[in-house]
Amino acid sequence: MIAIKVEGLSKKYHIGGKQERYRTLRDTLTDAFVLPFRKVGRLLKGHASGASDLHESIWALKDVSFEVKQGEVIGIIGRNGAGKSTLLKILSRITEPTEGYVDIYGRVGSLLEVGTGFHSELTGRENIYLNGAILGMKRAEINKKFDEIVAFAEVEKFIDTPVKHYSTGMYLRLAFAVAAHLEPEILLVDEVLAVGDAAFQKKCLGKMGDVAKEGRTVLFVSHNMAAISTLCTRAFIVEKGHKVSEGDPNEQIEIYLHSVQERTNLNLNKPLKLGSNLTLQKFEFLPNPIDSGGNLDFKIEIEGMKQDHINSIVILFYSCLGTRVAILDLRNKSFPLKVSEIKPIIIKGKIKTLPLVEGEYKVGLYINSSEIIRNFYDLITIRIKQEARNEIIPYPQNVRGFIELDYEIYY
C-alpha cells in the first residue's frame, strides 16, 4: 500500500525576492478575494509576468519522483543545499511546489526546523493539544498520550510556561515528543535531532525505531550515516535538487561518501547564506592538512544585511560517517554578538591540540541568532595526517576510534 507518491516535484526560489513565509488560513482566504484584482492591476501596468521575474531564480528541487510504501523507513542523504529540507517542507504542506504533485495517504507528523509547528505565545500544554487537533485527533486521544509526551520531553516543571521562554533543548525535546507520540501514520524528521545532547539523540533514535516497528512510515533526513544504516529500509541521495540514486541504505551511503571525497573543499570557497539575513563569508582552518596532535588556527567571518544578534556559535566536528566527534563552543562574555551590514563578526582562534586519528573529518557550524537556530553540515573538511611515532604499522583507521592518545611506555 502506498503512503506517499511524489511525481515530477520541483521548487523554484527567487534570489533577492521576498522570502516565502508560512501561511495562515486568513492569508489563504484573503488571497482568494484579492488575487484577481492584483492580476488585473499587473496587466494594466504591463507586468503580467510578475515582479519575481526580475530576480535570479534557482531550483531547490527539480523533477523529483518516488513512491514510499506504508511502513517503510526512508533515509534521505545529501550535502547542504541539496534540497532535502525543501522536500520535507513540501511533504509537510509548509510550502507549495512550483511543479509536480504529492499524494499523501495518512496524517503527517513532522519535526523540521526548530520553531516550526509551535506557537511561541502558547504554553507547552496548549501546543500539545493544538498539534493534536491539527492532526485530527480528539481531545480524549490526546489526553491518553499527554503524560507520556511530557515525560519523554522532560519538561514537567515548565509545561504551563509559554514555549518562547524554553531553551533550544527543551523546545526540541517537546517538539520531537509531540511529533512521535501523537501517532501520525507518516513521520517526517529533519536533521534537527542533532541539536540535542547525545543522550537525547539516542532516545529519539530509539523512539523512531519503535515507530517503524509499529508499521508507520518514516522519512528521515540525516548526515548521520550510522543512523541511516541502522534505521532505514531504503535510502536515496539528493544532489543539486535531483534524486540521483536509491536503493539499499549501505550501498547508498558508500556511493555518497565516495562522491563527497571526490568533491572535498578544504575551506569554504564561496560565501554561504545562513538565512535571509546572515551570510558566512569565511570559514577556514590553517594549516590543512595537519599532523595529528598539531595546533590549528581558525577564522569565522559572518555578515548581516541588517542588524542581528548572534547568541551562540559552535564549531562541530564529524567523522566521515556523520558521527559527532567533538564541538568547540565559542561563547564567552562578549556574547551575544551584534552583526550588521557595516559591522561583520570576525572570530579568530586556535585549537591548541587536535588529537584526531588520521583521516578526513567534516566540520560544520551551529548558529543561534535572532533569525535562525540551525546546524550547517559539511562546510569544510579537515585532513589529519599521521605523525610517524615508530616503525610499527598502526591498526587500520576503522578500528582505531577517533582520538590519538599521547603516551609513554615504561619497562
Image (cartoon, grey):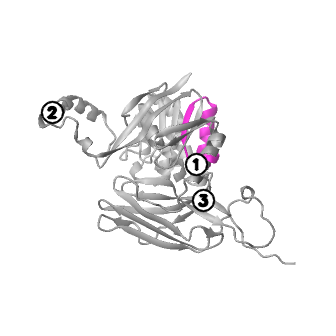
- Residue at disc 3, secondary structure: strand
Disc 2: which residue:
43
Q: Nearer the viewer, residue 224 or 122?
A: 224
Q: Earlier in the sequence, mark 3 or mark 1?
A: 1
Do the residues bearing badges 3 and 1 touch, measured as CB atoms within 8 Å?
no
- Residue at disc 2, secondary structure: helix
Disc 3: which residue:
361
Q: Nearer the viewer, residue 190 or 126?
A: 190
Point out the frontmost of discs 3 and 1: 1
Residue situated furthest left in the rendering: 44
Image position of 314 (left or right of 289): left
Quadrant assignment, res 339: bottom left
Q: Which mark is residue 259?
A: 1
**Going 42% across and 35% down the picture, which residue do you hit?**
90
Horizontal and vertical percent position of residue 281: 40, 62
Q: Earlier in the sequence, mark 3 or mark 2?
A: 2
User: Is 216 inside the magenta-drawn segment?
Assistant: yes
Query: Which contiguous range is marked in magenta?
Result: 202-226
